């Protein structure tokens, strides 16, 4: 039974003879993770009829926690195997599951904010347990932090929902001192960045304008976080234009945003904008006595950054390059 439920192709008609031969199978725990067949089926995106059959065979399973403290509902809210029909059915079978915390203090709402679910489903989960909006997991993260970390194309409506439910959450720090805007900026790396990134940033800033100057436990502002993670020009320039003073704020290791941009293979536009916002950054040294130009020259493909330095501040650049 456990092996069968571990396959996404399993159907109710396939399980029916197995249950007929061993009616108690739905109540038997797997040894390693202490999971029932319902947990395993929930992790593997099985057909909703499979869940109806397993629940009919052993109704209490919906509120049974596995070794990690996960109910079948938590197991169904997996990033790469999420079925809204299955999750909705499990909530209907026992709404009390929405108030259950895993060993990592995660509620179903924390999980729902991490998957590519519809706005209607996220609202369903929140309406079922409104207190979830202000609950932290074991890392001190609110649901809004998790939503921002894993931003998807559908995040604009979800973020609006969360801010309407608890606007103050935009100013709450997690266990690493990160505000939701830090979480958002930390996930902006890659060629495409975050869909609607500027719009999401604007929503967070409207709710908590002070976010732009806030530093996490590493002393990083949202601008520094975005640059460190390889955010696209549009988002970085938006943050810089919204709060130019961030260009002069060093992190706890003494690095300015310019040092971070120069030491990585980022767009020259970011380097130029940072230099224009804080020209003195070109002469500033890190704890290792390295200037931004030194860091740019140490990159594998440093030509674009170095060219920007030479064009914007030719005298200082020439002195450091020599």
Image (cartoon, rainbow, N blue to C red):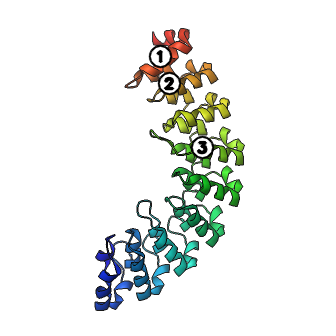
Q: Position of residue 176 (x, y in %)?
A: 57, 49
**Other residues around mark 1 within 10 Å, as few (<14) / some (14–19) / many (≥20):** some
- The earlier-in-sequence mark between 3 and 2 is 3
Say left or right for 103 vs 127.
Answer: left
Q: Position of residue 158 (x, y in %)?
A: 60, 57
Which numbered marker is on residue 268? Answer: 2
**Other residues around mark 2 within 10 Å, as few (<14) / some (14–19) / many (≥20):** many
Q: Which residue is located at x 49 percent, y 39 percent?
A: 229
Q: Quadrant of the N terminus?
A: bottom left
Q: Quadrant of the C terminus?
A: top left
Which numbered marker is on residue 307? Answer: 1
Q: Which residue is located at x 35 percent, y 81 percent?
A: 12
Which numbered marker is on residue 232? Answer: none
Query: Is the C-beta separation of discs 2 and 1 under 8 Å?
Result: yes
Say which element carries label 2. helix
Q: According to the image, label 3 marks what residue?
A: 216
Say which element carries label 1. helix
Q: Nearer the viewer, residue 24 or 316?
A: 24
Q: Which residue is located at x 62 percent, y 35 percent?
A: 239
Is residue 107 visible in the rendered image? The answer is: no
């Amino acid at each position: 039974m456990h092996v069968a439920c571990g396959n996404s192709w399993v159907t109710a008609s396939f399980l029916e003879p197995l249950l007929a031969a061993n009616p108690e199978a739905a109540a038997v725990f797997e040894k390693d993770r202490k999971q029932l067949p319902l947990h395993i089926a929930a992790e593997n995106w099985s057909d909703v009829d499979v869940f109806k059959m397993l629940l009919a065979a052993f109704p209490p399973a919906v509120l049974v926690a596995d070794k990690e403290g996960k109910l079948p509902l938590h197991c169904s809210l997996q990033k790469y195997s999420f079925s809204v029909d299955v999750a909705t059915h499990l909530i209907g079978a026992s709404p009390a599951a929405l108030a259950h915390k895993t060993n990592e203090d995660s509620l179903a709402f924390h999980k729902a904010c991490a998957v590519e679910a519809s706005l209607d489903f996220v609202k369903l989960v929140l309406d079922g347990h409104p207190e979830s909006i202000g609950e932290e997991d074991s890392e001190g993260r609110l649901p809004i932090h998790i939503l921002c970390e894993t931003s998807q194309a559908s995040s604009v409506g979800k973020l609006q929902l969360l801010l309407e439910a608890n606007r103050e959450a935009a100013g709450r720090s997690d266990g690493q001192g990160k505000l939701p805007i830090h979480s958002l900026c930390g996930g902006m790396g890659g060629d495409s960045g975050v869909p609607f990134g500027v719009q999401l940033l604007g929503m967070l800033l409207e709710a908590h304008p002070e976010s732009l100057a806030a530093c996490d436990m590493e002393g990083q502002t949202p601008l520094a976080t975005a640059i460190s993670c390889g955010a696209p020009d549009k988002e970085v320039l938006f943050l810089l234009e919204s709060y130019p003073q961030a260009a002069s704020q060093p992190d706890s290791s003494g690095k300015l945003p310019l040092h971070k941009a120069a030491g990585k293979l980022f767009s020259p536009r970011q380097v130029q904008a940072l230099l224009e916002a804080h020209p003195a950054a070109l002469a500033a040294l890190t704890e290792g006595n390295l200037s931004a130009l030194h860091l740019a020259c140490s990159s594998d493909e440093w030509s674009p950054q170095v060219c920007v330095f030479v064009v914007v501040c030719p005298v200082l650049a020439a002195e450091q390059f020599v």
